Image (cartoon, helix red, strand yellow):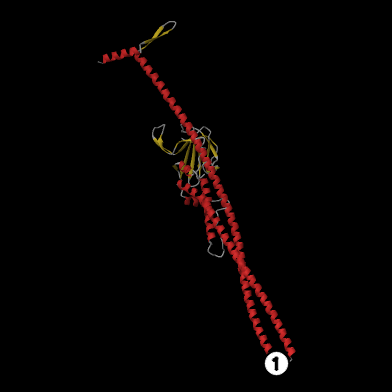
Amino acid sequence: MRTRLAIRIHSFLERRFPERRGFLKSDTDTRFIRLRSETQLIAMAGVTLFVAWSIVATAIVLMDSIGSGNFRELAKRDQQTYRARLNAISDERDARAEEALAAQERFNAALAQISVMQSELLASETRRRELETGIEVIQSTLRDTMTQRDGARKALAQLKEDTEGGASPHAVMASAEAQMGLLASVLYDTASERDQIQADAQGALEQRDELELELQLMNERNSQIFRQLEEAVAVSVTPLDKMFRNAGMPPDRILEQVRRGYSGQGGPLEPLAMSTRGEEPSPEALRANAILAKLDQLNLYRLAAQQAPFATPVNLGHVRQTSGYGYRRDPKTGGRRLHKGSDFAGSTGTDIFATADGVVTHAGWQSGYGKMVTIRHAFGIETRYAHNSRIRVTKGQRVSRGDHIADMGNTGRSTGTHLHYEVRVNGQAVNPMIYIKAARNVF
């Protein structure tokens, strides 16, 4: 059965692929190569498979090239959108800061004006009390004068009686007229002084009412300034607070650590001292102190953000992220291992930047990492930049966020030109994208 089947197959192949011979002739000898039907079939199948594989591989390369081009265009658009949004946020933050400074200046001017008005009000109140005291003195003098007038009248009556008893009428009348003229003059002066004091008192009361109205308007303007300041500070502090919480950094502990290590110029903002006599602070002083506390918190957030890796180590418009943090298959050993950072692929020599302020603790060759830079930051954070082609910093050097520290390369245990970026907290590797994503829409 097998023989017949084999004969039929051979006959079928003979009809499709007849046996061929190729002759190789030299000066002294002639040889030939016999190509059986089975050999021709195998060769044809091999050529067909090779052509099919070439077509499929070419299609895959073309599709990958087209996809990469679309991805780069999308990344460029995302980068432009991100930059535009970042610029808008920066402009808004600067505008808010300018508004806060202007509002603080207006608040200081308002406090100075309120102080002057309070001094004027106290002086007016003192003047009013002096006028009231003067009126009481005048009234007392008037009462004494009236008493003297009554005594003069009694003396006049007594003189009349004496005159009737035989005294000289002309002498008595002259004496009485002199006393009455003196009394009338005293009464006139007293009445004039009383009217003047009453007019001054009325003017002081009107001035007090005007000052109280102006003080009320000033308080309303101050209240509006306070509301604007409170809103501006809240808008600035809330995103920063959210950024630190999303990064797993407790804001209270971070701010306390920054406050303990603060050594900048100016120092933290101190509360307003409105009174030196131990009196309770006014509502305005309490609101002002609350705003100053928020501004102090904003300043500490700014210092803390500079010391934590909330930035990207490369310009995302020129690279792409090829691998993230987590377990993955090792292309050389085939096993699973923890990839302790994020990979960003780009061209050789691409600039690499420090993601936070810190001190360089390693700048050289490291087994597996190739040419590597390690930077120690605050809060127990350390960042690593590996597989570089060139290192531009030295050990012990202090760097700031955005400083150019290395060039991208393919040194060490690497399968292509890329940056391996790690973030370690207290020696333990964490996902770097936690910090990068937490700072998104903030910086």
Q: Amino acid at mark 1?
A: Asp
In percent of width and height, residue 322 lies at 46, 35
Residue 255 visible to the viewer: yes
Question: What residue is disc 1 on?
Answer: 162
Residue at x-position 47% and y-position 29%: 66
Q: Which sits in the foreground, 185 or 87?
A: 185
Q: Which sits in the foreground, 27 or 286?
A: 286
The N terminus, quarter of image = top left
Classify mark 1: residues with Cα within 10 Å, few (<14), some (14-19) or many (20+): some
Relative to 164, residue 110 above or below:
above
In percent of width and height, residue 336 lies at 39, 35
In percent of width and height, residue 442 lies at 50, 45
In the rendered view, does 275 fall on the left or right side of 242? Answer: right
In the rendered view, does 159 fall on the left or right side of 98? Answer: right
Relative to 60, residue 221 above or below:
below
Q: Can you tell which quarter of the image residue 273 is in?
A: bottom right
Relative to 331, residue 136 above or below:
below
Residue 360 visible to the viewer: no
Relative to 178, residue 237 above or below:
above
Q: Can you tell which quarter of the image residue 28 is in?
A: top left
Q: Which sits in the foreground, 428 or 108?
A: 108
Residue at x-position 63% and y-position 78%: 139
